[in-house]
Image: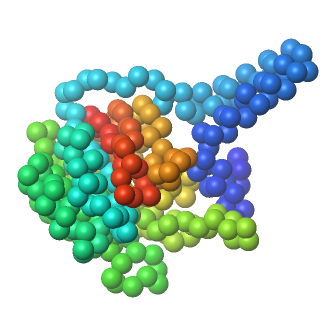
Amino acid sequence: MVPNTPGRLGSLVETFLPWLGLTVPVLLAGAILRRSFVASIALLLPVAAWVGLFGDLLLPPSHESAGQITAVQHNVSDVNPDPAGTARTLLKPRADLIALEELTPSALPAFAAALATDYPHHAAEGTVGLWSKYPLSDVRLVDIRPEGIGEGWNRGLRATASTAQGDVAVYVAHLPSVRLGLTSGFSSPLRDESAVRLGEAIAAERLDKVILLGDLNGTVNDRGLAPVNSQMDAAGSGFAFSWPASLPMTRIDQIMARSATVTEVWSLPATGSDHLPIAAHIRL
């Protein structure tokens, strides 16, 4: 209901939406101090609203293993001082798929060497990469460049992973960053335009099952990502805040699926990046 007026206040609120629940104990304290029964009962409304939006994230995850794969997503940072150590952290969940963003030419060999034994299949386009335990085919660049961005800006790829449950289209994407300023507000036009292009690519995907791994620079609640969010399942137990790594406040790194179910998502320990890695179980 909060409009995206100039400054995109709606998207800003949606980025940190779960934290609005912190107003409830503050209001409860006020109701207790005033000894107001009516105010205490009225608090049931924001509590119900919060539970309606986020209650499913607090439910225990499904442990059904049939048809389930594990994926890891991480923006490794283009100034990461320890690529090899970061790779070791990403190996711990024993994931089937690992997607990385902000891969620099200098860091790529370190990641490739550390992941090669467990992930014999690898694809990279520009600054994004995918490591897989499954054979990969039909690897290609996905052009998600906003208008006016040069041809060297390559942040999307698509590959077919041959799993035991059949072929799955795997997308890796890194959408443009948003900016927050006193005069400009929440500025996200490039991100939103890139989201439209990514959404069009997913809509045109011929395979039924799709997994999207990426730093989308937005949450699943942000209406700016509607071209993507409207097509994908991003549910699953857990908040898995991923940014900033020093004090995670929101999850802008996403693992989503189409014709599949994300059953659980969680954060991994900090690496040399300003993002936390996230992992998810996906039931195909």
Q: Residue at x 32, y 51 (%)?
A: 73
Please determine whether, in this image, residue 162 is positioned above or below residue 52: below
40 sits left or right of 170 in the view: right
User: Which residue is drawn at the image coordinates 15% and 54% (left, top)?
Assistant: 115
Count of picture labels? 0
Question: Residue 51's quadrant in the figure?
Answer: top right
Question: Could you tell me which quadrant the C terminus lies in?
Answer: top left
* Residue 150 on image: x %, y %: 39, 85
Its colouring scheme is rainbow
Q: Is residue 107 visible?
A: yes
Q: Is residue 211 left or right of residue 27?
A: left
4 vs 124: above or below: above
On the rendered structure, is 77 left or right of 90? Answer: right
Q: Nearer the viewer, residue 223 or 268?
A: 268
Residue 86 spot, x, y in % from top left: 28, 54
Residue plotted at (12% across, 52% down): 119
| x then y, percent, for residue 192 | 51, 65
Q: Determine the image quadrant of residue 3.
A: bottom right
Nearest the viewer among 133 and 197 is: 133
Instruction: Residue 120: name its quadrant.
Output: bottom left
Vertical relation: 65 (above or below) 147: above
Residue 226 lies, in percent from the top left, at 50, 54
Residue 136 visible in rendering:
no
